[in-house]
Amino acid sequence: MNLIRLVYYSRASREMSLGDLKSILEVARSNNDSLEICGMLSYDKQYFLQALEGERGAVNELYLDIADDPRHDEINIISYEYIDAPCFKQWQMGYAGSSAEFTRLLSDLGQSEFLPDEMTPQQALSFLQHLSGNQADI
Ligand SMILES: Cc1cc2nc3c(=O)[nH]c(=O)nc-3n(C[C@H](O)[C@H](O)[C@H](O)COP(=O)(O)O)c2cc1C
């Protein structure tokens, strides 16, 4: 099986409410469960940063659907790599938004606000991995 991890960021088309995020996650979790895709989503104010892990064809197809979603634009792939094992396998789609830990991780990267477009692929992945252990319960 060709397992891959795709990480992208995008710009939210407007500020997301808790309800907006819940409805994204509800659909994502149910779809990803049946597609055997896992990952982690983060959002703050303007940007989304998301990792998707799973079988190559399934992730590619899902990414194309996500990229078409009018709730965000300016989608940019940060990294696309073949992996031996998923690192977000506990989560059909984990989520983390602004929190003290989120701010601390950003400041470690020299950011005072969430700017995933300025993260290297390693920084983006490590940011999501750290957040996956510190998630908002939504
Ligand atoms: C930032 C963002 C992340 C998303 N992540 C996922 C995801 O991981 N899985 C998913 O199925 N849909 C995700 N969606 C929703 C998809 O864009 C799309 O609405 C959904 O796949 C459509 O499902 P349906 O064809 O079953 O209605 C995301 C949307 C946004 C804006």
Image: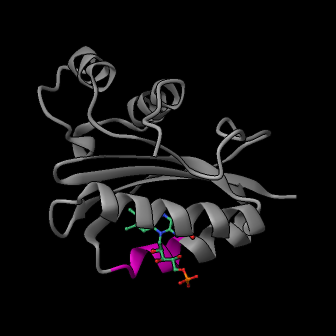
Residue 88 placement: quadrant: top right
Q: How many marks?
A: 0
Quadrant of the rendered image containing residue 124: top left
Q: Is residue 50 above or below residue 130?
A: below
**In the depicted view, which residue is nearer to us: 137 or 133?**
137
Examine the structure image and report whether residue 49 is included in the region drawn in magenta: no
Image height of 38 relative to 14, above or below: above
Residue 114 point in image, percent of width and height: 20, 37
Residue at 32% x, 61% y: name it: 19
Question: Is residue 119 visible to the viewer in this orientation of the structure?
Answer: yes
Picture residue at 25% right of the left edge, 71% below the top: 73
Indicate left or right for 59 with 43 as reference. Answer: right
> What residue is drawn where x is 69% and y is 58%?
37
- Judging from the image, the colouring scheme is one colour
Magenta stretch secondary structure, dominant: helix
Task: Give the x, y percent position of residue 25.
Answer: 49, 59
- Specify whether 45 is left or right of 116: left
Q: Tell me which residue sits at (15%, 67%) in the image.
A: 14
Q: Position of residue 99 (x, y in %)?
A: 28, 27
Please identify the residue farthest to the right as the structure is shown.
1
Q: Position of residue 70 (x, y in %)?
A: 29, 80
Image side of residue 14 versus residue 51, left or right: left
The range drawn in magenta is 63-69
